[in-house]
Amino acid sequence: MTWRTLRAEDACTKPPITTAFKASGYYVKQLLLDLTQTDAFHYITVAHQE
């Protein structure tokens, strides 16, 4: 498994995910679900399938 770190192009993803994570009461399952809805996740998923 390869870990992906935050990059400059992820700057627009971090604030809404951070806000949603706080709003959920730091509920990790919700964080994981929210992360799967980001453009970054979809890019990684598609790139991995190619």
Image (cartoon, rainbow, N blue to C red):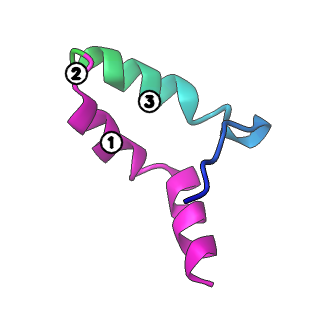
Q: How many marks?
A: 3
Residue at x-position 60% and y-position 48%:
3
Taking the magenta stretch, the answer to whether it contains residue 11 is no
Q: Nearer the viewer, residue 28 or 36?
A: 28
Crowd class of label 1 (few under 14; some 14 to 19; many from 20; radius 10 Å):
few
Real-space Cα distance between discs 2 and 1? 12 Å
Q: Which residue is mark 1?
A: 32
**Label 2's element?**
loop
Q: Which residue is mark 2?
A: 24
Real-space Cα distance between discs 2 and 3? 10 Å
**Label 3's element?**
helix
Which percent across, then down, holds residue 20? 34, 25
Taking the magenta stretch, the answer to whether it contains residue 49 is yes
Crowd class of label 3 (few under 14; some 14 to 19; many from 20; radius 10 Å):
some
Task: Give, as a single range, the part of the protein colored magenta.
Answer: 26-50
Q: Which mark is residue 2?
A: none
Q: Which residue is mark 3?
A: 17
Residue at x-position 56% and y-position 36%:
13
Q: Is 23 displayed left or right of 6 in the figure? A: left
Residue at x-position 32% and y-position 15%:
22
Q: Amino acid at mark 2?
A: Ser
Q: Main secondary structure of the magenta part?
A: helix
Relative to residue 6, is residue 2 depicted above or below? below
Real-space Cα distance between discs 1 and 3? 10 Å
Q: Amino acid at mark 3?
A: Ile
Q: Nearer the viewer, residue 30 or 2?
A: 2
